[in-house]
Image (tube, coloured by chain):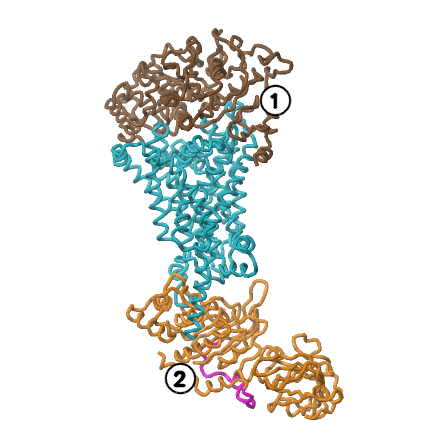
Chain colours: A cyan, B orange, C brown
Amino acid sequence: MATEDRIERVAEQAARESDDDESRPGLTLVAGAVAAAVVSPVAWLLLRASEVGLDQALDLMVRPTAVQVLVNSLLLVVLVTAGSVLLGVPMAVLTVRADLPFERFWTVALALPLVVPSYIGAFAYVSAFGPRGALADVLAPLGVERLPAIYGLEGTVLVLTLFVYPYVFLTTRASLLSFDESLFEAARTLGHTRREAFRRVVLPRILPGITAGALLVALYALSDFGTPAIMHFDVFTRSIYVEYTNFGRDTAALLSLQLLAVTAVILAVESRVGRDQGDYASRGSRRVRDRSLGWWTVPALAALALVAVLALGVPLGVLFMWLGRSGPAYAGGGFAFEWTYGLNSAYVSAAAALVSTLAALPVAYLAARSRSRLAALFERATYVGYAMPGIVLGLALVYLGATHVRSVYQTLPLLVFAYVVRFLPQAVGATRSSVLQVDPRLTDAARTLGQSSLGAFRRVTLPLIAPGVVAGAALVFLTTMKELPATLLLHPTGFETLVTYIWGVQEAGYYGQAALPALALVALSAVSMLLLLTQEGKDVK
Amino acid sequence: MLSEKDRRHGENDTVTEHRRGGAARTTTGRESDERSVDDPVLDLSGVTKRYASETAVEDVSLSVREGELLTLLGPSGCGKTTTLRLMAGLERPSGGTIEVDDRRVAGPDAFVKPEERGIGLVFQEFALFPHLTVAENVGFGLADRPEAERDARVAEMLDLVDLADYADRPPSDLSGGQRQRVALARSLAPEPDVLLLDEPFSNLDVRLRVEMREEVHRILREAGVTAVSVTHDQEEALSISDRVAVMNDGRVEQVGSPEEVFQHPESRFVASFLGQASFLSGQVSDDRVVTGIGPVATARLAGLDDTYGGALVDVLVRPDDLRATPTSRDDADGEIVYRQYNGPNFVYRVELENGDVVHCQHNHAEEFVVGEPVRVDLAADHSLAWYPAEPDDAATTGNAPAVPDGGDTPD
Amino acid sequence: MERDERDRIGGDGRIPSDGRQRTASRRRLLGTGAALGAAALAGCLGPFDGGDGGDGGTGTGSPELDTFRGSGAQVGGRPELSGVRIDDLPPLEGSLDVYIGGGEGGLYLDLLEILQDVYPDFGVVPRQAPSAQLANTIITEVEGGGSEADLFWSIDAGSLGAVADAGATVQLPADVVENVPENFRPDRQWVGVAGRARSIPYNTEQFSADEIPDDVMALATDDRFSGGLGWAPTYGAFQAFVTAMRVLEGRETTKEWLEGILDGGVTEYANEFLVSDAAAVGETGAGFANHYYALRVKAARPSAPVDLAFTRGDAGALINASAVGVVEGTGKRELAQRLVRHLLTVEAQEFFATRTFAYPMVEDHPPVGGLPTIDELETPDLDLAKLSDVEPTLELLQEVGVL
């Protein structure tokens, strides 16, 4: 028997390792090209930062405000990430593993806050809960004179968490949906209570999913400008913005590099905690839905309802309130809303989703199938752009466009490229986990049936990973819909989108005018969120 | 623990090895089932499991005795895995009671959670925890024991399954057979009262399956554990079990030793599911049944008495019960329509003149050709099972209307 | 694919296929010019729906001043106005790429639209973003070989100052800018077109006009205002105000002032509209804000008990300006300069005064709402370009704990 076993083992290992990048230089090359393209804007940062003298650079980095900004940024990242995990994971567990009434409704309602741009969310919060907000107006007659401060660290963490936790919610759901239920049952039969079994078996298995979501949250928190700006909290993005506003492009570049260094640290931490083992052998994922909540149903529903109200109800409520208000006395034709803005948003977002998906395929496939450091490096590299604040990326591309590729400057291709740089990792992540679920032997089977490696990919792997690819595309679509800073800098002149319009009218103080396009933006993105949710669990066989 | 519980598999073992050995029917079998067992370790009584739209398990009563290996055998979807999960506490029965060591673990007013039942389960896909090493997997169920004791027990278990060298490997490094042994060791480590095995060999290739059967058998015997296994593979069931419970459509059709259920299936379903079954249709006439291969004395048919005069019956014949002999077409009972070569033997399919189809097993040296007219003789020296004719029962084979043709084939 | 894009967007071909499209529709400014927009416009063209049989693009007649003028409580009883009128200028013909700062810039698009109605052969392709970002963009573009913009219209003098400092503007002819005060046209690299004054909006139920000190520095020490002030320290205009104070009074004095206000107790708001509104509803007694926000509050609620006070000769009396400059490397310098001339006509200045409540930049043009004229205000003697030096201000604000 030992011999039998050994033969079988060797065969399995061979099957697993047959896929090495030496065997496909073409794929490695393409993936490398994608990675190089998306980190290219960093070159501009280096160029600019090099203009700062060493002394000045050191001085800049150790001055008290710089240290404070670093501490604030890290604090924000840690707290928002922790908050998102604390919200997203239990909610994912409730919606996947419990007999929750109206589970589908809750799933959608709890995922939707992701479509609300955080700057709109933050604004809604300030106008609802600020010192002079709607809530204060309501409470004032009741003798409540002062609300707890919404500004500062607490408010920023609260608001940011409410609009980004769905990343964790979605990735954790995906992990739970592909979780092999027999592992849980095995733990039960081995003397573990539900709680112990969850802690010792389920949690370690879904950890890669949780960290994948947490990574997106952490980098989002690091790169978001709108929320900390509106909530008065001084972080990297705000310092960078201030520097640009004051034409300190060199110092801004230096700060951006500092921010990228923090990004690198976060990426390294995530690599250590959360890489999944690529255990595609885990099959038999029967989904069990008899986890009775019993008495806990009511508190659980109450908690979910509270989150849904805070993260979805408040911003939508405020938007509808604005919608109801009469327009300003002298709103001019310059602010007339046109539905084509919505069309433009959808069009450019769809293009970004398509290109991101195509660019993600080689990177994700290589990362899932190869164990080489190069493959991992390419995959990690795609996160750099995601962590880059939009204004930094935007200006970098203004420079690269104006200097080197004038023919695409201020055209849609460059704008779409900016979106791809910013949001590629979302597509890579979703695609990669789908590829991991596909037995590589299926590709081998296709090869033996006369398919080229590309043909095998197209006819076997692609259909199997389609749900993940579509989900990634949907995620890119909805984040592109709400992207503001790079859009403002790079959109073709005359090509207005929902966000540029919202920005324009908000900037001029006409919040009422922003309501309709903001609602249109949320509605369009919600469609893609629904598409994303329909893909859930489809690639789990 | 090993030595303490290692008191089964006495004569039973040898009997098990000699399955379908053609031994005369031992009458103890069926009666012993109906006799209440002295002290069942696991007792199911009237257990039913209904889901929203269907009934998966219906009124199942079973007793598993100390130290035995009982196998639930049936086609997929027959409810055997659900029965196993009910035993483990992973499902809650809709009706009936389950007792482990006289303790009620499931019933109308009781439900003991799986972690408190003292029942181990080996999963079909083994369900090894991919994030833990082999040793950590095996020690998983020993979380509440002192570390030294736990380590000792893990080492003991790994020795038992012959995987001591793999303690620190992740399960993904192991072959299928090794994974199964880890799964076994993991389930056995906490010393369960009953070990359940869900299709334990279905994930292994054919050669490994046979080896692992022996290996699992050895491990179970050494561990002295009471075990219930589930399979759809009749050969596996017959070869490793002390007793077999054949399930169909959510019910237990028959429980008994492998020999009993094979030789004396109580239903057409059991007969067909276990081994190759053919049926000779015939009509009872005085002390004989007139069939397509000639008259068969009623004395050879178990339990057929005078009250059945004139009745239409189907007599169960296995391939080794029949022999074909080439003869002239005038003299023949039928002709060979298919030849199946199995290596050690041939099984010939013969279509009789009355339309019945039967199978005859022959030594590999006896070669006939398709189309050859043959005479078919009854070669069995044991009593034969029979069933009232059910012309519409599509599940049986060779069930053409019994029209005795009065052929005078010798018995 | 480019053709495809154009079709899909369904427009009139205004999506630049190579990023450098110069032809532009006469009408739409923001949009991509879909059917909806065109239809919407058909209804609001007003008296200048000219071009039918017009003689060579000069429009069909003199534009009415009322077309430029706003309406409402703040705009009653405008006096007779004199100065250069649109009719006095050569016509605008051709198309300009204008980078236009956000915020108030949105309103300026209306003015450009009216001008395009006056001149059927004139078109503007506007590009909107925050002024500072546009300034960065222009500087970067010029570094990279040339800007896409012909004209830069920023909402603050600082952004244009930065572009000018980078050598990315071209000097305006002296006769174009002669009627504008000199500190709003340094070296003629750019010229202010509409001003906004720092002011103190106060609640008239809590204070009378003479109770507001005319020295902004006094507010920090005056007990009557303790706990009753509002400000928006993250707002650019406020930071410019503190920068001015720093330049005029020195760092230490400014720091003491900030600490004094903080110690007295002050409410922080996200922007200065909210500061003005807070004073109007009595939540605060007074605040620091640009002058036009209180006028906007009054426009929405004419009975609101809010009025404006101006300090004298100090940072509190600072006037900043929306400004325009012709971008280095443009091939349309002549046309761009002609547009600048138009922005300084009686009509355009009246537009700024009555629609945006801004201070007209042309001397002798009166502001609305009973505001003192620009020469009645005692503005500090300050080079507006210095306002772009915000970094030390931010450090200071952070140091005292305001930010």
Is residue A135 visible in the rendered image? The answer is no
- Magenta residues, dominant SS class: loop
Which residue type does callout 2 highlight? Arg
Q: What stretch of residues is rendered in magenta? A: B21-43
SS class, disc 2: loop
Q: How far apart are marks 2 and 1 (CA)?
A: 100 Å
Q: Give the answer, above or below, for where A480 lies relative to A11.
A: above
Secondary structure of the residue carrying tag 1 is loop
Residue B234: percent from the left, percent from the top?
55, 77
Name the residue carrying label 1: C43
Number of numbered labels in the structure image: 2
Q: Is residue B207 magenta?
A: no
Output the chain of dot 2: B
Q: Name the residue under label 2.
A: B7
Residue B40 lies in magenta, yes or no? yes
Front-most of residues B395 and A382: A382
Q: Mark 1 lies on which chain?
A: C
- From the viewer's perspective, tell me whether residue B332 is left or right of residue C259: right
Residue A226: x percent and y percent?
41, 35
